[in-house]
Image (spheres, rainbow, N blue to C red):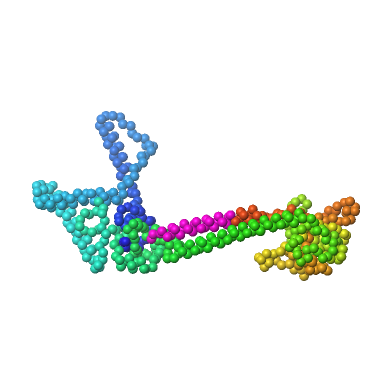
Amino acid sequence: MLRLATRGQGLSGRLPVRRRLQLPAAFVPSPRGLSTGSSSGSGDVSARSSVLDEAAAAGKDVEEPSQTAKPKAKPVDTTTSLDVHREVRRVERRIEDHVRAIAAGGGAEEHCGDSSSSSSSAAFEEAAERLSAEAEAAAAARAALPPGSPPALRIRDPNAVADGAGKDVVVRSRTTTGQVLWPATKEDIEILSESNLMYPAPYEVEGSVIIRLVRLSDPVTSPVARVMRNRQFGIRGNEKWQLLAMGVVSMLIVYSLGAWQLKRMKWKKELVEMRRTRLAMPKIEVRTSPFPWKDQVDDYVYRVVEVRGVFDHDREMHVGPRPGADESGETVPGVLVVTPLRLEDGSTVMVNRGHLPANRLDRESRPELPTWVRVRGVLEEGEIPNLVGKYARLKNRPDKKQYHYLIAPELAENACARNHEECSQALVTAIDVLFEDDFKAGMRRQLPYTMKHKEDYLLFWADEHTHFNYAMQWFGMGTLLLVMTFYKFVEVSRWRF
């Protein structure tokens, strides 16, 4: 375990570092840029001049290059600062090796036979003095450390000084700050492990020193890259468990929506089968009260019923507005017309005659006389609101004869029915109307109403197949959410700071 000290000066806007040296605790200096040289162009000019001079001296005709000739591209010098440093160190090592060889052989007096030997001896002495000064500076640096401080790590690099002095692992470049590796003591590990982890932005630690623990097997990364990576949610403290909990709860909610759609699919399938079965049953003829469906409407709903009576046009009620189709099939605004039908014994049945276009609402445009009529239709309870619609949608106002929905008990309040209880339990939606006068005359009058058909009761905008598709979509989203949550949880569990 190592203790890494990183200076925080100039962290803002820095680039992340890359690995260069293979150390026990991988250390990463900063990236190097390429330097371009400008001496190649002058070299071409001098070379070309020398060729022309040689050709003139030989007496040959030399063709001058055209003024419009395309200039040659200048080669780019790809020499890096590390290459320059290595070359300098190679020269310095040769001088150092020579100095040591002379010292081991009894001094430099044997090589001082001429002036060149004396100049070489002076260079050697200068190099020896410089090495001695570096050693003294390293010893002074170690003496300045607090008592009990662990020694700095030594770097094993073929380009490093091969003397007894220790060399701190310090990176100093133009794109990152210095990072020093120190061996962590047991006390250091305990103190830093129990401390609160901080993840500041680079500009928040300007001029500060950041201390953190690193493993020997983990690379030493750039402060900027580490800060930006460690600021995301899920890696601090118990955040990974919060992330897992939120993912699981969200997945359960999405799965519950899929289960709800499967339940709706089963309910819709049973509803369609029930309607198909009851519409195929024999019709029920009603002449007088009491009605067969009294107090047991659920057993007779969607049965075909035939009633005989006279329409009370003065009690006509309009439900809407509702869109409908005219004779050409185009959608037009209008209302649903509900008219009380008086039976032979004076009892009343409410009949939904169908959709009436808005331009035919005036009764003078559709005069009707009271006459005996036979109505064949489907028994319905009306539009029963669900839990949401019971509180969220508009209400019928029977006292002002304003109706927005087909609700039998509220429509019966203006029907003036003698059998109000029976009348408020259900109504008949007409699918065919036959006037007895037309039957005797051998004709069929045209009515302005658009009536429903038996097949319309088997059609839904969301049938059982639509609910199944919705369920698969919810299950797919829940599974995807679970996979992403588990992947993120594993990723943050393996996170290394």
Pick the residue in front: 41 or 101.
101
- Pinpoint residue 242: horizontal percent, then vertical percent: 47, 64
Residue 415 makes an appearance in the image: yes
Q: Is residue 5 above or below residue 108?
A: below
Tell me: 458 left or right of 103: right
Q: Using the rendered view, name the quadrant where residue 181 is placed.
A: bottom left
Q: Is residue 346 above or below residue 356?
A: below
Q: How many marks?
A: 0
Q: Quadrant of the N terminus?
A: bottom left
Q: Is the stretch drawn in magenta largely helix, strand or loop?
A: helix
Start-end of magenta stretch:
472-497
Pick the residue in front: 303 or 475.
303
- Pinpoint residue 176: horizontal percent, then vertical percent: 34, 58
Pick the residue in front: 279 or 14.
279
Q: Using the rendered view, name the quadrant where residue 388 is placed.
A: bottom right
Determine the residue positioned at 9% across, 47% down. 113
Farthest residue to the right: give it. Answer: 441
Q: Quadrant of the C terminus?
A: bottom left
Residue 333 makes an appearance in the image: no
Q: Is 489 covered by the magenta stretch? A: yes
Determine the residue positioned at 25% across, 32% down. 57
Tell me: 382 left or right of 86: right
Q: Is 471 covered by the magenta stretch? A: no
- Pinpoint residue 24: horizontal percent, then vertical percent: 30, 56
- Pinpoint residue 71: horizontal percent, then vertical percent: 36, 39
Tell me: 203 left or right of 93: right
Farthest residue to the bottom: give it. Answer: 399
Farthest residue to the top: give it. Answer: 60
Determine the residue positioned at 26% across, 56% down. 155
Q: Is residue 70 above or below residue 14?
A: above
Q: Using the rendered view, name the quadrant where residue 410 is placed.
A: bottom right
Determine the residue positioned at 36% across, 58% down. 222
